[in-house]
Image: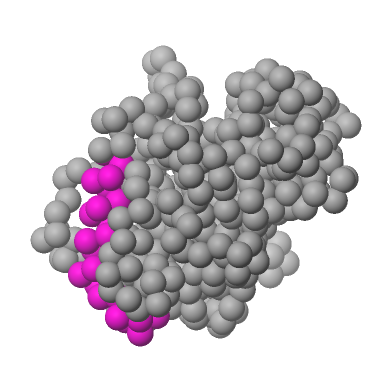
Amino acid sequence: MNQDDVVIVSAVRTPFGKFDGLLKSTDSIELGALALREVVDRIGLDPKEVDEIYYGTCIPAEYAIYTNVPARQISLLAGFPESSISLTIDRACCSSMTALRMGLRAIKAGEADVIIASGAENMGNTPLIARAEKARWGARLGPIELEDVLFELGYGRKGFAPVAADAGEVALEYGVSRELQDEWALQSHARWFQAYEEGKYTVGEELMSVTVPQRRGDPIVMDKDESPRNNIDQAKMAKLRPVYGSPTVTAGNAPGLNSGASAMVIMRRSKAESLGLKPLAKIEACQSAAGSPKYMACVPAQAIQAMLEKTGRSMDDLDLIEINEAFAAVTLVSLKMLAQDNMDKFAKLQAKTNVNGGAIAIGHPVGASGARITMTLMYELMRRGGGVGAAAICGGLSQGEALMLSV
């Protein structure tokens, strides 16, 4: 145990909501502030001890009505000192894992001792937008056309293909069939329900509760994820039509457009000891990656492989893996790459990946997901008495992040 190790001392997330669920009208900034407050309260950490707050969010249209600097806004709303330093990060779905990587760098460089890495999104709360040339600079009589920035996630407006289309095409290129993607999606839900029944997704560990005010009646306490489903089967999945021109990706083998927030406190081991805090896990390494926009499904594997080479480890050293289910295609393509097309190894990697369900079941509020998969990995390693694991995530237009933990 090196006193300069960077360790995680607190990690929490809100339950993740459905597109049209309980959180549909709750601003991402509010969710981010709730997670920020909870992550320090759980360990009795004085916010004054936090050197910097990094906050990932990547649908600016959702918080646009609050102008900008959401990281600064959540820190103040959460009651942090006015002197708190913060930074908003948009690296698409990678954002909150990028926050962890930047926090690791700051601590390793000796510029900080305590960092909070966080992220939030409420995709269902994203407003429709009227372009300035139609609404501000020339609208007269008649209707104003509104645009939905969630449609194809906006990439098509600048000539990029929808990510669902790219993922489906790349899946077939790598021999990952629609049927296999549907099976993985069903397994994601089944694994979540098994984990929930075993008490792994209860408030107090990974989860916090969120109280949601109602227009009429008492507030509702939200204490579990809304998206997991146990009323689907292979036949129902097979009937779903692909979306956005994808050959394989459907609403069933992809996550929803979700809401939620996550936050983690990381610090130097010596700082944790001085504050009397128990390290939960050590961050062994982080690795970013990027590639050809079409091949987003490959980037988690590329980031993991680069990280393994940098640390001198191999896939056999990993006890558990989390690869974000941006689509089932992403997780399966990356696992097949990591298995180097060895089908026995491919099966073994599937068995130890997303063992408590993934984003297809849990949800994928994009700014929050990188930290979410990291804490899900950490808590499962803790339950098993220790080990080494890797978490990886892709982001729009083929960006990626990977992180390695030891417990």
Position of 208 compared to 175: left or right? right
Q: Does the magenta stretch include residue 54?
A: no
Relative vertical location of residue 264 with respect to residue 133 in this rendering, above or below: above
Q: Which residue does the image show at 30% across and 51% down from the upper left?
A: 188
Q: In this view, does 236 lie to the left or right of 216?
A: left
Where is 6 relative to 213, above or below?
Answer: below
Count the marks: how many?
A: 0
Q: In the drawing, does residue 127 fall left or right of residue 381?
A: right
**What is the chief secondary structure element of the magenta stretch?**
helix
Which of 204 and 219 lies nearest the eye of the viewer? 204
Residue farthest toward the left in the current orientation of the protein: 235
The residue located at (77%, 37%) in the rendering is 3
> Residue at horizontal 74%, vertical 47%?
103
Image quarter in which the C terminus is found: top right
Q: Give the range drawn in magenta.
A: 170-193
Q: Which residue is drawn at 65% across and 57% down?
A: 286
Choose top left, top right, bottom left or bottom right for residue 180: bottom left
**Residue 259 place in picture, x, y as percent:** 48, 43
**Residue 141 spot, x, y in % from top left:** 59, 64
User: Residue 18's spot in the image, x, y percent?
Assistant: 39, 43
Relative to 339, say whether 16 is above or below. Answer: above
Give the camera-side residue of 355 and 278: 278
Question: Is there any visible trace of residue 15 in the rendered image?
Answer: no
Q: In which quarter of the image is the N terminus?
A: top right
Q: Where is residue 359 in the image (x, y as percent from the top left)?
A: 40, 51
| Residue 295 shows up from this direction | yes
Q: Is residue 97 left or right of residue 112?
A: left
